Image (cartoon, rainbow, N blue to C red):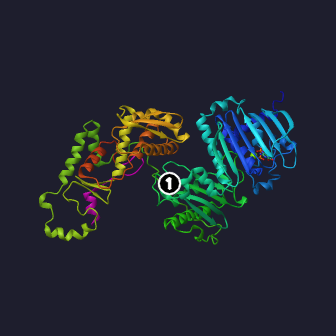
Amino acid sequence: MSDIIHVLPDSIANQIAAGEVIQRPASVIKELVENAVDAGAEKIDVIVKNAGKTLIQINDNGCGMSETDARLCFERHATSKINNADDLFNLHTKGFRGEALASIAAISYVELRTRQEDNDTGTSLVLEGSRCKEQTPCTTAKGTSILVKNLFFNVPARRNFLKSDTVEYGHIHEEFLRIAFIHPEIAFSLYHNDKLIYNLLKSTLKQRIIAVLGNPAKERLIPVEQKSDVVDISGFIGKPEFAKKTRGEQYMFVNNRFIKHPYFHHAITSAFEDVISANHFPTYFICFNVHPNLIDVNIHPTKTEVKFQEEKIIYSILRATVKRSIGAFNLGSSIDFDNISPIDFSSVPQKGIPREPTVTTHPDYNPFHSPKTTDTYKNTYSTLKTGKADEGWQKIYESIQENTPAESSIPDEGEQASMKPFFENEENADVDNRSAMFQTLNKYIVARIKSGFVVIEPEAAMERILYERYNKYLTDSPQNSQKLLFPETLTFSPQDSDIVHDLLKEFRNLGFDMEAFGKNTFILNGVPADVVDINVQEVVEQLLESYKNNLISLKISKRNNMAHSLAMSVGRKKMLSLSEEEMQSLVQALFITETPHVAPSGKKICITFKENDLIRMFR
Ligand code: ADP
Ligand code: MG
């Protein structure tokens, strides 16, 4: 038996490591820009061609490297940032693994030019697939310029898995902003295909946000500030009324590093709970400063999740701080934010256990399995199944009619007078109590049925009706489209545009006559014949947001997801005061659906009160 184990050569080891660190062009941008920040640069230029697939170049005016370091930096585990294991608990730099440059060099063609301030000459280095092709002295500006070409040239599998330029550029753009937002003290520029995308001057965080989001943001930001023993929080939140329908600017940083933290995200959104509607997303830029030893340093190179030691306490502080900022803003815009006294968290017990927030869900509910219909609907339902929808409605209607009190049972004058105080407190005091249906609390429809009465939540009912209607359009009978006199253009983010492209056929079946027009733009030639008075851009944005959420949280088909999402976004109208006729057609349409008592989102649609139950309640 001969020995079969051998140690892999560095070039292959690096290529394997690269698979973890460098997933796409945006990962190169992230690593190189972070290196430039760690090098103390005051100005960083990012130049990208074809979404980084052909060229990525980063120029910085940081500390530069010596001749030897310029060669060493491409070795695996070569770093100037830590010396021993203890340093891991006191990190002040973004990098520390010494893996990025070795990984990048293993899978691309790299040119490096670098010079330290007190050297007259710099060093130029050319590498291809980890191999150093040449190293020569050169004249170059102070700092480092690194150029990466033909990414993944020797890893075809990776290269073939890259998405369209639009998608890949979208990732680059996002990585760039994640660093640029949190380093306003550094000037940044970004060029894509020779076009200047951003030229961000040295500034404050607020000015940086405005420089990126545009001038209107100036009036839309509320400062957030809180110091405590465990954490210092600073940053800005967007005013509630500017919350968006698509998840937009939500940034969290810890010690100048972008992080994703669902638990803290929940703290922020729950602070917004009462002031924005459920389908809107607040804007936030929240920076945490904590002692480096209070967070887990074992951060995966490409992951953005960070573990905090005092998560529960930080959750409460964060939520209270954001709430206070919103409250202060609501008191009036004349308020002087600099003089609001921060909450005193100095007495926060270090090991206290603040109550965890509860999220209400229906754990057993699956909107895509029809639950057993309740007795009340069984008859109607089965009639409808046989295709006699009108008969079904007739039954309910008859039942409602039957339950309309006969003349003789209408209370006489005296009785009416004694009932007055009760009715006076009701919003529906003027409802004709002989009518078969009425609306109460500006919302619920109350209808009498044979065995008692049923209370219907009209918005949830609408959701159910639309969901089933759209599902039908998507399966067997596409909806007619109504031509627009003036076609509209719709524009979406690169990520959203990709989804729209993917769903064009479904959109057409639903009556949205849309065609692609350039990368992120679409022309809308017609809208569904039965949809009036909607802002299509808004509806489609809501649809995409809910579509994306469903992709993550529900394992449902594209068709169900699309029908569900559109029903949610079209059916969002408030139904405040419905006419008798409107109530009747809504109830009629509801009872011919497959599951009239629960909406696709899980919301309860109707509750039946049996006469017997009612009588029992008074015993
Ligand atoms: P890490 O950042 O984890 O240390 P890298 O592979 O990204 O690992 O970089 C290796 C080393 O190369 C860094 O520790 C640093 O000393 C040096 N280096 C990389 N980029 C630059 C730069 N732009 N300017 C100066 N030094 C740099
Ligand atoms: Mg690095």
Residue under the point 59% across and 62% down: 224
Q: The N terminus lies in which quarter of the figure?
A: top right
Q: Residue at x 44, y 39 (%)?
A: 562
Which residue position holds label 1?
243
Residue 306 appears in view: no
Q: Quadrant of residue 229?
A: bottom right
Residue located 34% across and 37% down the image: 529
> Depth check: 333 or 500 in front?
333
Which quadrant would residue 325 be assigned to in this image?
bottom right
Residue in front for this viewpoint, 202 or 290 = 202
Magenta-highlighted residues: 597-619
Amino acid at circle 1? Ala
Which corner quadrant holds the C terminus? Answer: bottom left
Give above or below for 575 relative to 339. Answer: above
Q: Is residue 21 above or below residue 209?
A: above
Q: Is residue 75 left or right of residue 217?
A: right
Where is residue 181 shown, x and y percent of the image?
A: 64, 52
Left or right placement of residue 26 versus residue 609 in this view: right
Q: Judge whether residue 167 can be spotted in this image.
A: yes
Residue 198 image point, x, y percent: 63, 46
Within 8 Å of ligand 2, the CB of disc 1?
A: no
* Position of residue 277 measured from the top left corner of the image (x, y, whole percent): 45, 55
Q: Position of residue 512 (x, y in %)?
A: 40, 36
The answer to whether 498 appears left or right of 532 in the picture is right
> In the depicted view, which residue is nearer to us: 218 or 313?
218
